[in-house]
Image (spheres, helix red, strand yellow):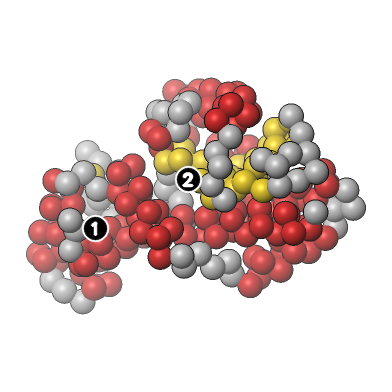
Amino acid sequence: MLSERQINILGAVVEQYAEVASPVGSHLLAKIFNVSSATIRAEMAQLEKLGYIEQPHTSAGRIPTDKGYRYYVNRMSESGHLETPQRAERALTARIGEGSVPERAIRNTVDTLVELTHNLGIATIGKQLYMSGLSNLFGQPEFMHPGQVQEVARLLDNLEPWLREVAPNEPLSVYIGSENPIGRSSGCSLIISKFSSPYSDKSYIGVLGPTRQSYKDVMALVENAGRMLERSF
């Protein structure tokens, strides 16, 4: 059981790491929480012992583990506070409205998610998987190693048949890092929304990006995209 302070520190590590792409140190967190660096180090040591954060070999800072991300995502999902910024919501509404046929509306929405999240966007259109934004995905610092790129490519190759077979049934599903059934070592998170379309009662739209990302914003955008598409049809 984490204390309220530990929960808040973990959340800050997730959010700061998403923003700056470098391990988060105790001095920064001490300023955020207005406590001593020693207090933060003690709490971080406990979070590390419990497996929620880890220390890369080359840094004094910490980064979240898959377990840490999962705890953060579950807390956020349970709170029900997934709000899409108005600017992003207007962009989604406008692009969906430009689609005179369902396929175009879905493609437009994926392209908008790519622009807003800087991740790879995906959607099922009939039995096809539409993808956009590959350069975004492979431009992330996490994917500079050839072995990592290979794992991501394997995940993408198998994504469409996996979606068809498993057919996740939640309005919003989040698969973090090693939770992915394919490409477990890819260091990716898959965030997808199920919606009903003229093609299927179980169509999907979402994004694939590094585990280091702004889950609060991306989850809200993906969930909203699925809901808006469903309403438009």
**Element carrying mark 1:** loop
Q: How far apart are marks 2 and 1 (CA)?
A: 27 Å
**Which is more foreground, mark 2 or mark 1?**
2
- On screen, residue 96 versus residue 54, left or right, reads right
Note whether residue 78 is visible.
yes
Where 92 falls versus 188 (above or below)? Answer: below
Tell me the quadrant of the picture where the C terminus can be found.
bottom right
Kind of residue indicated by mark 2: Val
**Element carrying mark 2:** strand
Q: Which quarter of the picture shows residue 124?
A: top right
Residue picked out by circle 2: 174
In percent of width and height, residue 55 lies at 22, 44
In the image, farthest residue toward the right = 100
Residue picked out by circle 1: 25
Q: Earlier in the sequence, mark 2 or mark 1?
A: 1
Nearer-the-camera pick, 112 or 199: 199
Kind of residue indicated by mark 1: Gly
Note whether residue 119 is visible.
no
- On screen, residue 111 versus residue 159, left or right, reads right
In percent of width and height, residue 227 lies at 66, 57
Residue at the spot x=30%, y=49% of the render? 68
In percent of width and height, residue 213 lies at 46, 51
Residue at the spot x=80%, y=51% of the render? 105
Residue at the spot x=70%, y=33% of the render? 129
Number of residues whose C-alpha sits closer than 10 Å to that of mark 1, classed few (under 14), some (14–19) or many (20 or more): many
- On screen, residue 97 versus residue 150, left or right, reads right
Nearer-the-camera pick, 92 or 38: 92
